[in-house]
Amino acid sequence: MSMIGGGHRSFIGVVHRIASYMTEDYKLIGGVFDVDYEQGLQFARDMELDESRTYQDIDEFIAQENQLNVDERVEVVIIVTPNFLHYEMARKLIVAGFHVICEKPVTTTAAEAIELDELVKKNNVVFSLTHTYTGYPMVRQMKAMIADGAIGKIQKVDAQYYQGWINPFIHEKEKRAQVWRLDPKKAGKSCCMGDIGVHAFNLLEYATGLEVDRLLSDVNTLYADNPLDVDGTVLLRLKDGTKGVICASQIATGEENNIVISIYGDIGGLKWEQENPTYLTFMKEGDPAQIFKPGNPYNSEFANASTKIAPGHPEGLFDAMGNLYKGTARAIRNESLTEGAFPTIKDGVRGMKFIEAVLDSSADNNTWKEIN
Amino acid sequence: MSMIGGGHRSFIGVVHRIASYMTEDYKLIGGVFDVDYEQGLQFARDMELDESRTYQDIDEFIAQENQLNVDERVEVVIIVTPNFLHYEMARKLIVAGFHVICEKPVTTTAAEAIELDELVKKNNVVFSLTHTYTGYPMVRQMKAMIADGAIGKIQKVDAQYYQGWINPFIHEKEKRAQVWRLDPKKAGKSCCMGDIGVHAFNLLEYATGLEVDRLLSDVNTLYADNPLDVDGTVLLRLKDGTKGVICASQIATGEENNIVISIYGDIGGLKWEQENPTYLTFMKEGDPAQIFKPGNPYNSEFANASTKIAPGHPEGLFDAMGNLYKGTARAIRNESLTEGAFPTIKDGVRGMKFIEAVLDSSADNNTWKEIN
Amino acid sequence: MSMIGGGHRSFIGVVHRIASYMTEDYKLIGGVFDVDYEQGLQFARDMELDESRTYQDIDEFIAQENQLNVDERVEVVIIVTPNFLHYEMARKLIVAGFHVICEKPVTTTAAEAIELDELVKKNNVVFSLTHTYTGYPMVRQMKAMIADGAIGKIQKVDAQYYQGWINPFIHEKEKRAQVWRLDPKKAGKSCCMGDIGVHAFNLLEYATGLEVDRLLSDVNTLYADNPLDVDGTVLLRLKDGTKGVICASQIATGEENNIVISIYGDIGGLKWEQENPTYLTFMKEGDPAQIFKPGNPYNSEFANASTKIAPGHPEGLFDAMGNLYKGTARAIRNESLTEGAFPTIKDGVRGMKFIEAVLDSSADNNTWKEIN
Amino acid sequence: MSMIGGGHRSFIGVVHRIASYMTEDYKLIGGVFDVDYEQGLQFARDMELDESRTYQDIDEFIAQENQLNVDERVEVVIIVTPNFLHYEMARKLIVAGFHVICEKPVTTTAAEAIELDELVKKNNVVFSLTHTYTGYPMVRQMKAMIADGAIGKIQKVDAQYYQGWINPFIHEKEKRAQVWRLDPKKAGKSCCMGDIGVHAFNLLEYATGLEVDRLLSDVNTLYADNPLDVDGTVLLRLKDGTKGVICASQIATGEENNIVISIYGDIGGLKWEQENPTYLTFMKEGDPAQIFKPGNPYNSEFANASTKIAPGHPEGLFDAMGNLYKGTARAIRNESLTEGAFPTIKDGVRGMKFIEAVLDSSADNNTWKEIN
C-alpha cells in the first residue's frame, strides 16, 4: 500500500497505518507523504522505506508506479490529505486503476461523490471509505441482528453524536480562526454535519439497512459571524415512512465523542454507545434487557470475525479501523465478503447528499428536502 | 387533605398519599374517592376514615366542607381523577377557596389552563401541579447550579423521554382500544406529547430557568387509523435564541422511562437521567467530569433540603413527589419558599401551550409555532 | 404502633415512620419518644397524637398499655433507641406480649440475641429486624431466582460493603471522640463489622438461603490506639463447603454506600449493587447478561409484590424498608407470608454470631471460627 | 525482532505482533515459529519473511544470529511459547545477549525467576514481561496520581479479578482434561492464581508503588480430584502495614474479565475497571467523584504519552500491549524512560513469589506467608 499524505505532520496517518498492520495484509511501500517533498523523504527514511518510491506529487506517483510490473506495483492507496483534496486525489487514482482507501468526508460536494461512484464502477476498483465506527464488532452485531429480524419491523430511529470540542474556540473570532474546520475554504460547506452528523447518518443507514428519504433540519452556527454550523437537529423520514432524528453538536460542552444509536422495532430495540463500544443492549419486548459483548458464541459470525481477542478484553478504535482494512483487503483479493464489511464510495455519495440536504433544509426555512 | 378520586380502583391515589405521608405535614380526612359512592365509602372504611366526610360528588364536598369551621375544614384537595375531569374539579375547588394539588395534565386545553391561572390569582389559593421529576434532589441541584452560573451561558438544550409501553398495543386496532390514552375522548388531543413530552418540556424549562419561544414538530401516529401521536421530535427555539430539541416516544420498544436531560453552556454541561436519579454529571470545560450525588455538603441547600437520608442511600419517585408535597405545605402555611419548590398553575399553562403548539406545527407541514 | 425513641432528636425515627406510612397498615398511637419526657411530649403534640399515650419510660408504657382493651392497645412497638438499649427494650416488650420492630443491631452480644429468640418463641410475638436492604425488589428477585435454580448449585459467594465516612474522623484522636460508633461503650465490640459487615453477611445468607459455617477474618483498626475495627476482610466457608468472602470498610475514602453482592453457581451468576438498586444482573453461562428491573412481568411474584409503581420509576430506601413493614403487618395479622418477607430475631441471632466470630478470628491470629 | 513460538497455531502471537506494529519501532525478521519446523517455515512464507532466518530451535537461532553483524542481527526476541518453556528460552536468550519480551508467567517457580533476574543484570539486557494491563493509559494515570499524592497515604487496597470461563469445564473430569491450565504438567503449580491472581497482584503493586510483605490465602479447587486452584481469596499485609485483599476466580460464572482495582488513601480513593478501561474514578474526600478519561490535558504526561487518539475514542487491549512494546523499544535504544513504562524481570520475580506464597498459605492451614 501507499499513502497520499500521512507523514510526520499528519495526525490520522498513523491511525491508518496501525489499522493496516493489524490485519497483517498490508505493507507500506511508498507514497506522497507530505506536500513538502523533503519532509516526505525524511518520513520514508525514518520508516526505513525505499526512498525511490517516495514521490513529489500524485501525478508522479501514478506515472512511476504504472511503469512497474503488476506484482511490484502498489495495489492500494490510502488518501489522508486535507479534506478538500480528497476528490482530486481519488479521481486520479481510480482512473489510473488503483484501489483506494479514503478518509472521510469523501468529497466536498455530492456531485463530486457521484462522479467518483461512476468512476469506481467503470474502472472496477475497490473504494473503501473509513467510516470507522462501522468496524466495531457490536455495531456489526447490531446490523446482523436487525437484518435477522431480532427487533422486527423498524418503527423509530435515533442517532446522537455530541461533542464539545469546539466550545473553547467558538466564542471569539480570533480563536475560531485557529480551527480549520470552521473555515469554509478548508472544511467545505459544513462543520458539524460534515464532520460528525454524517457519521451518525452513516451508522444509522448501516445498522438498519434502510435509506433516509427526506429530511428537515435546523442547524446552528451559534454566532451570526460564524459561517459554518456547529450544531444541529435533523428530522428524518426513511423510504418506508419510518420517522427518526439525528442530533449532532460540537458545542455540547464536556462531551467527548458521545455517539448513541438507538433503533426500535415492533418486537425489540437495540442501542449502542461509542464510548463503551463493547456493549450492545438488546431490549426485547417483555424480556429483561440483554447485554451483548464481543467474542461470545451467541454473536453473529460477522461480529465475531471482527474480534481478535477473548471476551472481556476491550478492543478500541484501531481495531475498528483495522476491521475496515481487513474487509478492504478481502475485496482487493476478490474473496467473499459479508455485506457491510467496509464502507464504499456508495456510502460516500449518500453522506454528501445528507450534508447538502441538511444545509439546504435549514437555509430554506426548515422545510423537507429529499436525499435520493 | 382530601382526595377527589384515588380510591381502591385508582393506581395513582396511593402514590400521592405516600408522598403526602412522607412530609408528615398532611392527614387524609375525606373526599370523593370514587364515582361509585359505595366504593368510595368502602375505601373510607378500609382506611378508618370518618365516613361523614366521604361525599357523593364535588358539589356536595364543597357545600358540606364549607359549613365546617375553618380549623376543621379540609385545607387542600388532591385531584387524581381521569384527566378530562381535572379542569372542572379544579375550577370548582379554586373558586370555593380550597388549595389544590392536581395530577398532570392540568387540563385538556391551554385555554382552560389559562382560566385556572386567573382563578388561582383571584382566589388566592395554592395550586400545585405534580410534575414529579422536578422533586428529585439532583434535578434541583441541576437547577441551582445553572442559576449559579456553573455552566455559563446556555447554548444548547436537549431533553429525551423514551418509553416503549405502547408497543404491545399499537399494532392492532382492537388492542389500541384497551388503552385509554389512545382514545381522544379520554386523553384529549395528544397521547405522547401530552403524557410525556410535556414532562420533558417542563424539566427543560425548570432546570434552565429559560422559556421556550417557538417550536417546530414532527409527531407520529405510526398508523393512519390511530388518531393520537405516540412519538415525536420537537425543534426548539428559546426566548434568547438558544436552540434545542425534545425527543419523546412511547414506541421506543424496550425503554421503560428513559428521561435524559442535557444542558450545555459555554463553560460546562450538566446531564441527569431519571432511571439513575442519584447521579448528576457535571462536565466542566477542561476538567474531568464530576458526579454529584444527593446529601453531600457540596450540593446546594435546595438540593439537600430535598433529601431525607445519608449519601449513598437511593431515594425514589415517592421521595420526589414527597418533595412537591413538602413545598406545597410550606406555601399553604405561607412559609418562605425556594423558587422551584413545586410546579404551579403557571407550569400547567405552559405545558398545555407546548402540547397545542406541537400538534399545530406537525399538522401544519412542520412549520414553526410560537408558544407564548 | 408505638415507638420507643424516634422523637425530634432521632434521625432514624422518621425513616421508620415513613416506611410504616407506605403500607397504609400502621398508625402511630404513642410511645416513649425521648429519654427527656418533655421533649417526647412536645413531639407528640407536634404530631397531633394523643398525649395520654406518651409515656415516661418503657415500664410505664407496658403497664399503661396493658390496662387498655385489646382492640385499643398498641399492637406493635418500634425500637429505635441507641443500640445498647435494644436488648433491654426488646426483652421487656416481648415478655409483655407486644410485637416488635427493632433497628439493627438486635443486641450487643450473641447471647442476648439467643435469649430474645427464645422469648419470641415462648411469647408467640412477631419480631422484625430492619435489615433494610432485604426489602429491595431486586434483592428479593435475586433470592427467588436462586431458590428457583436459575444459577444452579452455588459455587462462590462474594459480598462487599465499602464506605468512606469514617475517614475524616479516624486520623486524629479528638475527632474520633466525636463518633459514637468508635466508642466501645456505645457501639459495643465492633464498629465496621457490627455496623455494615453484618449487613453484607445478612444479605448473603438471605439471597442464597445458605448458612455460613466458619470464618477467618482480618480486621483493621488502622491505628493502635483506636479500639474498634473500621475495616476488614472475612473468608467464609458455607455449611455445604462453598467458599466465599466478605469485604467491609469504612475507610474506603470516597465510597458512599457501595454494597455489591455477587453469587455464582454452576449455570449462572447474579449480581446486585445497592447504589443502583433497580438493576439485577443475571449472567447465564453462554448467554448475554440480562438486566432485570422492578415491576416487570418476568419477575417473581415476590419481587413484584414489593414494587408499588410502574417499571422505570426508581424506588428507594424508604420503599425497601416499607416492604419490611408490610411483611411484618401480614405476620401480625397471621396472613400468608413469602419466606424472606422480613428479617426476624433468627437473623438477629446469626448477625451477632457473625460479628463475634469475626472479632475472635482476627484476635486469634486469623484462624477459623465456627458461627453455629 | 524475532519470535519464539507465535506461528499459525498460536493465539497470542498475533496480539504481540500487532502491539509491536503499533509503535512503528519493531520489524519482524524471523524466529522459531513452531515446534514443527515445516509449520514454522510455512508461517514465514505467509508473512513474506526471509526463510533463512526461520530456525529449527532456540539453539540454532542463537548460533546463527550470533554470526551476523550487530546491525543485522535480531535485537529483541519475543517468547510466546507454552508457559513451561518460558524459563529455558529466556535463560538461553539472555545469556546470549538478546533483549527479551516474555509472555507471563515468567517461569514456573520463583527460584527460576530469581535466576533470570540475576542473568538479566549480569548480561545487561532489557527484559520485558507483558503484564498488559499496566499499559492502559488510565492505569498509568492512577499510578501517577498516587505517586503525586492525590489520595494521600494509602490505607486500604483491594484488587478483584473475576472470570467464569472454567465453569463449563470444571464439573466433569473429562472436560477438565481439555483445559491445559488445569493440568499441573503444563500449567505448573497454580491455575487461577498463576493465571490471573498474579495480574491483580502486579496491578496492585504497580499502581501503588508499594510492596506486599505477607499474605494469608484460601484457595479453592472446587473438587477434591481437581489438583489446581480455580478460585481464591488472599489477605494482604503491605510492607508499611497497610491491609488489603485480592479476590480471584475462574468459576465466577458469567464474568468475562472483570478486573477492578481500588486504592484508598487518607484524602481520596481511585478505582479502575478493566472492562471499561477509559474511565478512572477519583473520589476525593468531600468532593464529587471525578471521572478521568484518556487524552485530556488534565492527565499526567505519562498517561497521555500512552494514548494515540483524541479523547472519547476508546483504545483497547492491543493499544495497552503496544505501550509495553513502546517502552521496551525505548529501553533497548537507551532512551529516557518513565518508571513503570513496562514490566521487567523484577515483576516476574515478585509474581512468582506471590503465587508460591498463596499456595503455601492455603496448604498450610491459611497461615501468613512472607513474600520477600
Image (cartoon, coloured by chain):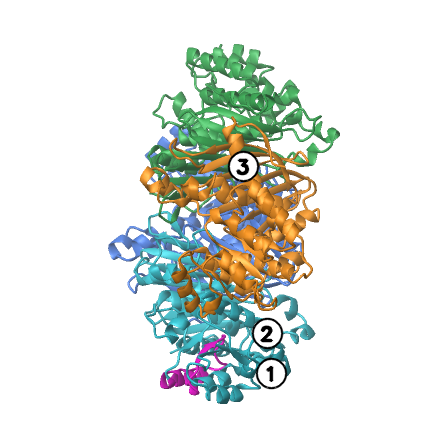
Chain colours: A orange, B green, C blue, D cyan
Residue occupied by mark 3: A356
Image coords of residue C281 (percent x, y): 58, 52
Residue occupied by mark 1: D35
Q: Which mark is residue D10?
A: 2
The residue at 56%/43% (across/down) is A112
Q: Decide: few, some or many residues near mark 1? Use Cα within 10 Å; few <14, some 14-19, many ≥20.
A: some
Looking at the rendered structure, the kind of residue marked 3 is Glu
Same chain check for tags 2 and 1: yes
Q: Is residue D107 magenta?
A: yes
Alpha carbons under labels 2 and 3: distance apart: 49 Å
Alpha carbons under labels 1 and 3: distance apart: 59 Å
Label 1: state its secondary structure: loop
The residue at 47%/65% (across/down) is D22
Q: Are marks 1 and 3 in contact (CB under 8 Å)?
A: no
Q: Quadrant of residue C323?
A: top right
Image coords of residue D362 (percent x, y): 49, 75
Q: Quadrant of residue B342?
A: top left
